[in-house]
Image: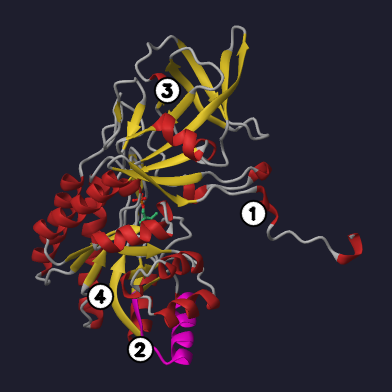
Amino acid sequence: MFLPGTMQINAKGHLEIGGCDTTLLVQEFGTPLYVMDEELIRHNCRIYRDIFARIYPHSQVAYAGKAFLTTAMCRLLAEEGLALDVVSGGEIYTALSAGFPADKMIYHGNNKTPAEIQLALNSGVGCFVVDSISELELLEELAAAAGKKANIYFRIKPGIEAHTHHYIQTGQIDSKFGLGLADGQALTAVERALKMPHIELKGLHCHIGSQIFDLKPFQLAARVMMDLINEIKEKTGFLIEELDLGGGLGIRYLNSDLPASVTDYLEKITAAVKERAAAHNLPLPKLLVEPGRSIVGEAGTTLYTVGAIKEVPGVRSYVAVDGGMMDNLRTALYEAKYEAILANRANAPKEQVVSIAGKACDSGDMLIWYIELPRLTRGDLLAVLSTGAYHYSMSNNYNRFTRPAVVFVQNGQADLVVRRESYADLIRNDIIPERMR
Ligand SMILES: *Cc1c(COP(=O)(O)O)cnc(C)c1O
């Protein structure tokens, strides 16, 4: 079994993360509980930052906030010197509340509202990633009204779409994100932007998918983007100086997963950029990457308490835990698969194949369909691995279950960074109309 980061099994046979015994974490904070290995998050930030700076000095790492964002996470990112991708007014507000510098925020999204754009302009967000010509026009209008000039990247569809183990190359991909290449939209947008007095065109951006193991589509995308920079220079005379190649590097969910290393990934994309720059006789652009999953994914573990166990003779054995699709939507959304460890008897021999069910009122609420585990009983503690990215950030109140707490663990210390929701939180915004009282 792979044990990410500081995870280990202690002398009592208990799972330990960040030097904290998970059975004690559960006594203090309850279940379900998101446990984040702070040392591993920081390690991942530094790997990206330091390796990128070494092989391509004019570079910047922007963490994709949508993977996992809280005020404490924003503090950590500021300490580690990363920039931050935000995609909503709520993420901007969260980062500002934590004192994260606005000029290091990169604002994404395919339908930013006027109110969100105004918030971003007024707080001094560093860069807008403009997704459409309609958004470009709205931004010019709002920037003019605010008396500001907005730095922008254009989001481009490079015609390469990658999904985990496969990628496709098409002339015109069907995606709600970005401006097309083959249809000339990208070039039209650039020409329009260059004429706008409150828009400062800084760069181009692309993001080809997520949980990608094969590095080839990343290289292809880098080449296509460099070729576009060249085409823009030839057709308009304008030199694009920054190139943001998005996120998407895969992580380990299963023992059998073999993701590429960050070093290999950065070497491959920078080589592609340098090769095309040389071919077109272009200066090297400032380069950005935007990892989300590969910073926080393996650093997160969800702890659950085992409850009802139901044998369906000749079919399967259902083991229900006290969470489910409310704290982990990925199995239901993407048929995601996970490894799990019996945290309170981590060395016990595996004896049975079971299915781990959530407790929501939906048959699709299954966390793991097949896993070999020791014999389980009510009250056992189950740890599901690699739940740091797109778990807390996608958590919800289906069935009016309360969202779990989040703790950062490091050096034997556990700090609460998100309080467990209370029942009072659930009805905080509910209103009974006067006529029903
Ligand atoms: C989701 C997203 C990312 C991060 O993707 P990961 O797979 O988590 O690394 C980066 N950039 C953009 C624009 C995204 O939408």
Mark 4 and mark 2: span between their CA atoms? 14 Å
Mark 3 and mark 4: span between their CA atoms? 60 Å
The three-letter code of the residue at mark 3 reads Asn
Magenta residues span 134-152
Rendered image quadrant of residue 300? top left
Mark 2 and mark 1: span between their CA atoms? 49 Å
Q: Check residue 343 in the rendering and tell me which mark sits there, or answer none.
A: none
- Residue at mark 1: 425
> Disc 2 vs disc 3: which is toward the camera?
3
First-in-chain label (3 vs 4): 4
First-in-chain label (2 vs 3): 2
First-in-chain label (4 vs 1): 4
- Residue at mark 2: 195
Mark 2 and mark 3: span between their CA atoms? 64 Å
> Residue at horizontal 30%, vertical 33%?
7
> Residue at horizontal 60%, vertical 32%?
364
Magenta-colored stretch includes residue 284 = no
- Residue at mark 4: 232
Mark 1 and mark 3: span between their CA atoms? 31 Å
> Disc 2 vs disc 1: which is toward the camera?
1
Say which element carries label 2. loop
What secondary structure is the stretch in magenta mostly built from? helix
- Residue at mark 3: 344
> Disc 3 vs disc 4: which is toward the camera?
3
The three-letter code of the residue at mark 2 reads Lys
Q: Is residue 242 above or below residue 9?
A: below
State left or right for residue 346 relative to residue 396.
left
Badge 1: few (under 14), some or many (20 or more) residues near its Cα, within 10 Å?
A: few
The three-letter code of the residue at mark 1 reads Asp
Rendered image quadrant of residue 358? top right
State left or right for residue 264 relative to residue 315.
left
Badge 2: few (under 14), some or many (20 or more) residues near its Cα, within 10 Å?
A: few
